[in-house]
Each structure stands twice: as structure tokens, then as C-alpha cells.
Amino acid sequence: MQDGIGKNPSLVKNTNFLLFLSSRSFSTLAYQMLAVAIGWHAYFITHSVFFLGLIGLFQFIPMFLLTIPVGHAADKFHRRFLALSCQVIEAILVVFLAVTTLFGHTDKYILLGVITLLAAARAFEGPSMQALMPALVDEEAFPRAAAWSSASFQAASILGPAVGGLLFAVKPEVVYFTAAVLISASAFSLGFIRHEHKTRTSGPVSISSLFAGIHFIFSRRAILGSISLDLFAVLLGGATALLPYFADKVLFVGPAGLGLLRAAPAIGALIVSFFLARRPVKKNAGRTMFAAVAVFGLATIVFALSRSFWLSLFSLIVLGAADVFSVVIRSTLVQIGTPDDMRGRVSSVNSLFIGTSNQLGEFESGLTAAWFGTVPAVLIGGLGTLVVAVLWMKLFPELRKLDSLSKSSIAATTAPNVHQPG
């Protein structure tokens, strides 16, 4: 029996989960620092906004191309060992970047090359880590585990950019060496996790086995509805991509105000993550999820219309808080509703949906801002999110009727081809 798994599971006593949480925290902190450092470094070398866009593209392409093989690997091989191997590779790549920067040899091609290889390694690491967590905690404790995992991510999202910016001001290579140490610490924590490894997929690789994750998602309406809800809600409600314009032209608060605006969603998310870790959703989970998406859309609308810095800040805090309610419910539904031998492939498709929504959400925000103006673009995005919430409630009534996040309730909701009249 694993630590903390039993009739009354305790995450505090679950050594494996605590190691997993520390690994995820170190890794997220490192990559939040790298995101700031690489962005500044790239702009310092090229002075090109277009090149900054290329960084996002070169991060997305490996994830898109590797979605199918990544999922199969996460189901066929030892997930902990696969994630740990990826982190070792990532640490080596970041050390290489630090050394080339230290000796003044880093150019834009080295940056793009390292970014692409890091993205490829992360593409394998992400689904493996997502699929590993359900093996470390009891189903009853999973909603709280998901909330703690979200809290660690949000805390790192607040701390990482600030630390990365400060260290970059000292010297760029200092950020890279520090990030490499943090990734190594993440791998070290992961290496001490002990859990029973079960052989999952067997037999030769076939087209059907590679695409089984996609088939599984489309055969479970509740899982398809939850994943696509995230895709379209984030795709339409991407106000954060346009924050520099609002800080400069609408709210007149400058770089200092922009920093607060960027941190606001993570602050709201962190508060709610701690709340859900102590008091998980126990009933009306489906309605709570849709309500959270609606609040996300309303907060986006308020932000678009606001001319007060404090109201804008508050609306972004509410936006981040609402997002976590939705994320925790959706992640619990997807992970518990997916058999263990399919979690890697389903997680890889889910990661693609999330990555697509974030990347294309920024593109959509920029495109609609160019067409209609920046404020109308954010307003349209908020209204679109409300429309999606209402439409998905109608299209996926099984999601709306989800009551608790217990294994039995989720199993009934995610049964193949379940369709309940609205």
C-alpha cells in the first residue's frame, strides 16, 4: 500500500505525492525563470518582435508533431523513468545554454535550437507527469491533490518571473545555471518516488494503438466536452496577451503596473487552489465548472470595459480564481475517467489542446485587436466565452449533470457514448 492511501487518505503523509509535488514545483519555477530570461535574451540579441513570436512557434511545433508518439510512450514505458530522463536532458541543454552565454557564443540560432529541443523534451515529460499522479494518490484524494498541484504551479508562476528577471539583471548565465540546478532538483525528487510500475500497452506498435487516445476521447462525450471547453474558453478569453497595451494606453500604469496585472491571475488562482485543497468540490461539480467558465468570461468583459487600475486588477484576480475551479474539476474528470493504460495518450492529447488554446489564444487576441481594436477584441473574447459556456451546457448535458467527483460518479458520466437529453 502506498503512503497515505487508504480509507482516509492523507496527502501530508503521502511521501510519494510530496516528492511529486516538489518535483513539479522545482520544474515549473525553472521554466518560469527561463521564459523570462530567454525572452529578454532573444530580444537583446535580435531587437526583433517577430523573433519573439518565433520562440512561441518553435515551442509549439514539437508538441504538435510529437503528440501521438508521446502519448504512446507514456503508456508503454515507465512514466517516472521517462519523465526523469527528460529532466536530465533538459538540465544538460540549459547548462549548454549557460556555458555558451558565459563565453559570449550564444546567438539566435543557438537559442532557437535549445528552445526546440527543450520543447521536445517537455512534450514527453508533461503527459508522463500528468499520468503519473493518479498512481500516487487514492481516487478520493485526487481532487485535493489536483488543487495542491495547481497551487504549486501558480506559486511558481508568481515567483519564477520575478526571480528570473532579477537574476538576468545580474548576468544571463546566472539565470540559466540556476534553472539547471532547479531542474536537477526536480529530477532528484522524482528519482526517490517509489510506486509499483505496471506494464500497460503491449504488443507491436500499430496505427490503432497510436491513435487510441484520440479515439477514446471522442468516444467519451464528457471527456471530449471538458477538454474542448477549455480549448475554446481560453482561445476566446485570452486577455492576458494584450496586457502591455492596457497598461500603457488604457490604464496608464507603465511597467510597474504591468507587472501587477500579469501577476493578478496567478494570485487569484493560488488563493482558490489553497481553498480547494482544503475544501474540494463535493457536489454539483458540473454546474460549478460551467459557472466558473461563465465567471471567467464576465471577468474578461469587466476588464475590457474598466478604466480603473484597481478594478482591472480585481477582475484579473477573479479571472484566475474562476479558471482554477474549472481546471481542477476538468483535470479530475479526465484523469479519473481514463483507465490507467490510456492516461498517457489521453494526457498527450489534452496537453496539445491546452497548448493550442494558449498559443492560438494569443494569436487570436492579436488578430482581433488588429481587426476591431484592442478593447473591443477583449470584449468580444469575453462575450464569446459566455456563449461557449451556454452552448456546451446544451451540447454536453452529461457534464452539466455531473454531481460529485467520486470515482463512481465520474465513471457513470464518462461511460462510452453516454448522451443524456438536455
Image (tube, rainbow, N blue to C red):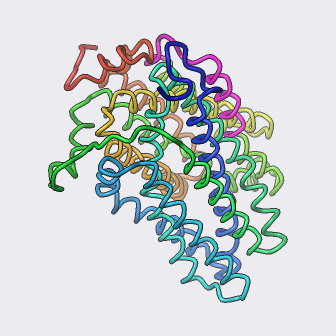
State yes or no: residue 195 in magenta.
Answer: no
Secondary structure character of the magenta stretch overall: helix
Left-right relation of 80 to 159: left
- State which quadrant residue 228 falls in: top left
Which stretch is magenta?
Answer: 265-287
Q: Quadrant of residue 334?
A: top left
Q: Where in the figure is residue 179, as x and y percent of width and height?
A: 68, 63
Instruction: Indicate whether 56 appears above or below 399.
Output: below
- Whether residue 81 is situated above or below residue 170 in the rendered picture: above
Residue sitting at x 65%, y 33%: 302
Q: Residue at x 66, y 38 (%)?
A: 303
Establish if 95 lies above or below 209: below
Left or right side of 119 for 413 = left
Residue 281, magenta (yes or no): yes
Q: Quadrant of the C terminus?
A: top left
Q: Tell me the quarter of the picture where residue 379 sits.
A: top right
- Nearer the observer, 234 or 194: 194
